[in-house]
Image (tube, rainbow, N blue to C red):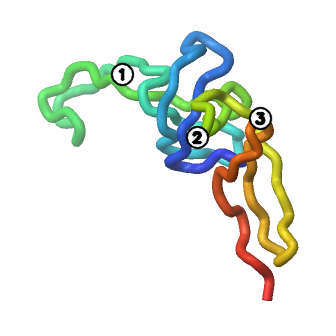
Amino acid sequence: MHIRKGDQVVVIAGADKGSRGTVMSVDRANGRVVVEGVNRVLKHVRRGHPKSPQGGRLQLELAIDASNVALIDPTTNEATRVTVRLNEDGSKDLVARKSGSLLRQISPASK
């Protein structure tokens, strides 16, 4: 899974299809991600809850499957698939398939 906390993603399947947001957390063991503003639910809490001392309903985001989101290519501002490019110095980069632009460095050069 090439999605990390802080990445900009777009939802490509499900009820929130087309929504964009920032990844808030990643659960690699279960293959799920929490995206800001996506899959919002109301949770009823009793009085005395740390986030809501007066009680009521909290609105929060639940995790969605990582296969339902795609990274956003910074040059085209569209969803893109990604590939790993191995450089001559031994470093690895995450690259957008559509434009070939660099998204981030995965591992530094080996010594």
- Does residue 18 sit above or below 75 in this rendering? above
Residue 97 in the image, given as x and y percentages of width and height: 79, 39
Residue 101 in the image, given as x and y percentages of width and height: 70, 47
> Mark 3 or mark 1: which comes first in sequence?
1
> Mark 2 or mark 3: which comes first in sequence?
2
Q: Residues within 10 Å of mark 2 (few under 14, many from 20)?
A: some
| Left or right: 89, with 78 as reference point | right
| Left or right: 101, with 110 as reference point | left
Disc number lying in front (3 or 1): 3
Residue positioned 75% across, 49% down in the render: 95
Foreground pick, 89 / 4? 89
Question: What residue would you read off at disc 2?
Answer: 74
Q: Is residue 1 visible?
A: no
Question: What residue would you read off at disc 1?
Answer: 43
Residue positioned 74% across, 39% down in the render: 99
- Does residue 18 sit above or below 76 in this rendering? above
Residue 33 in the image, given as x and y percentages of width and height: 59, 37
